[in-house]
Image (cartoon, helix red, strand yellow):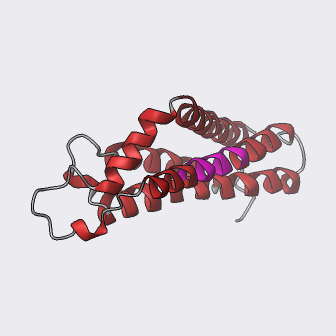
Amino acid sequence: MVLRVAKTALVLGVALYTTLIVFNNLSDYGSNYEFVRHVLMMNSAFPNNHAMWRAINSPAWHTAFYWMIIVWEATSMILCWWGGIGMAVSLNKVLAQFRRAESIAIIGLTVNLMIWLVAFLVIGGEWFLMWQSETWNGQMAAWRMFTVVGIVLLVLVQPDDEREKR
């Protein structure tokens, strides 16, 4: 039971954190949009960079990328809340019921991991060379979130007791 409570609390913690990320992206739209815009324009990459052909200078594309990130985050948020609340409701229920809710949470956490890995570390960090920017570099924050969410996912896939096999 203790592990079920821990799993549930961790998933709900990720759900809350992701909710605040989505809230901040919507309530402070301009600041966060600027981040995406500068990364896509690559305007703070190293001078004379031979990869500048990758830069996207279209405001329409900046907006599309930003909304894609927000929708991606919101999807993860909804799945984590759905799974976490389902886990909380089924804490004292049979294992199969808890596992159904846990499966939704696993999907939500995986979607969340993919945001940080694909959108920020791969596309932003490597394709748009965000790592070259001192100002518009979100790789450390992305790595932090990838690590936190990854640890929560690893806890989630642990068996609930010694008798259980995954």
Quick one: which residue is furthest to the left in this view?
Answer: 48
Q: In this view, does 14 lie to the left or right of 146?
A: right
Q: Which of 148 and 43 is in front in this view?
A: 43
> Magenta segment: does it hold 77?
yes
Q: Which quarter of the figure is the N terminus placed in? A: top right
Magenta-colored segment: predominant secondary structure: helix
Q: In which quarter of the image is residue 165?
A: bottom right
Q: Write down the region rendered in magenta.
A: 69-78
Tell me the residue at 43%/52% (across/down). 59
Q: Position of residue 42 (x, y in %)?
A: 27, 55
Q: Is residue 89 left or right of residue 49?
A: right
Q: Nearer the viewer, residue 100 or 1?
A: 100
Q: Position of residue 113 (x, y in %)?
A: 52, 55
Q: Where is residue 158 in the image (x, y as percent from the top left)?
A: 63, 55
Q: Where is residue 27 in the image (x, y as percent from the top left)?
A: 56, 29
Tell me the residue at 38%/63% (across/down). 122
Q: In this view, does 12 lie above or below 71?
A: above
> Magenta segment: does it hold 118?
no
Q: In which quarter of the image is residue 106?
A: bottom right
Q: Is residue 161 visible?
A: no
Tell me the residue at 29%/44% (across/down). 136
Quick one: which residue is furthest to the top in this view?
Answer: 27
- How many marks overall? 0
Q: Is residue 25 visible?
A: yes
Tell me the residue at 31%/61% (across/down). 128
Q: Is residue 19 above or below residue 122?
A: above
Q: In this view, does 127 lie to the left or right of 160?
A: left
